[in-house]
Image (cartoon, helix red, strand yellow):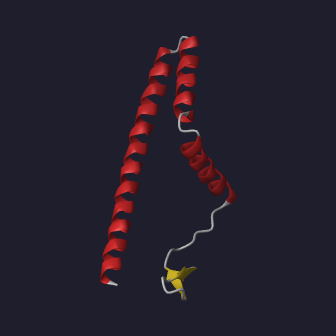
């Protein structure tokens, strides 16, 4: 398990090292680029997934494929619910980490 050393400067000006037990994972190139692409899209182009969905629906309708348009809409709705679930889990995890840090700060 890799550990990260952080330099901490205390209020009295002294330096200390803080070792965190955060494991580091080495990703394959494809997984790394996929993850990075997801993060960039999420943070800088949040409307891109809905624009892609709308384009797919319009394309299916222009072909006269109503069932295809409905399928695209259902899949998008399912994906949206999954992203919402993941977001809630992330928020809960961040809240637990913040709570642990607060308790640790008060005890230390």
Q: Compared with residue 84, is residue 25 higher up or lower down, i.e. above or below?
A: below
Quadrant of the snapshot with the N terminus: bottom right
Q: Tell whether 107 sits left or right of 28.
A: left
Residue 8 versus residue 73: which sits nearer the camera? Answer: 8
Residue 65 versus residue 104: which sits nearer the camera? Answer: 104
Q: Is residue 93 visible?
A: yes
Q: Compared with residue 96, is residue 45 higher up or lower down, i.e. above or below?
A: above
Residue 27 versus residue 89: which sits nearer the camera? Answer: 89
Q: Tell whether 89 sits left or right of 4.
A: left
Q: Percent from the top left, x then y, of residue 23?
A: 53, 74
Q: Percent from the top left, x then y, of residue 104?
A: 34, 78
Quarter residue 82 falls in: top left
Residue at (53, 28) in percent of width and height: 53
Q: Tell whether 104 sits left or right of 3.
A: left
Q: Percent from the top left, x then y, of residue 77?
A: 41, 32
Which residue sits furthest front?
12
Q: Is residue 3 visible?
A: no
Which residue sits furthest right?
29
Quadrant of the snapshot with the C terminus: bottom left
Residue at (30, 82) in percent of width and height: 107
Residue 25 versus residue 41: which sits nearer the camera? Answer: 41
Q: Percent from the top left, x then y, of residue 9?
A: 54, 82
Residue at (38, 39) in percent of width and height: 81
């Amino acid at each position: 398990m890799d550990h990260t050393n952080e330099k901490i400067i205390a209020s009295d000006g002294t330096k200390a090292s803080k070792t965190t037990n955060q494991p580091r994972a080495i990703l394959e190139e494809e997984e790394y680029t996929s993850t990075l692409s997801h993060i960039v899209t999420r943070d800088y182009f949040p409307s891109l997934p809905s624009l892609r969905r709308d384009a797919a629906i319009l394309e299916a309708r222009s072909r006269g494929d109503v069932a295809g348009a409905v399928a695209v809409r259902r899949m998008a709705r399912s994906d949206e619910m999954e992203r919402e679930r993941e977001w809630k889990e992330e928020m809960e995890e961040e809240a637990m980490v913040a709570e642990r840090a607060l308790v640790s700060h008060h005890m230390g």
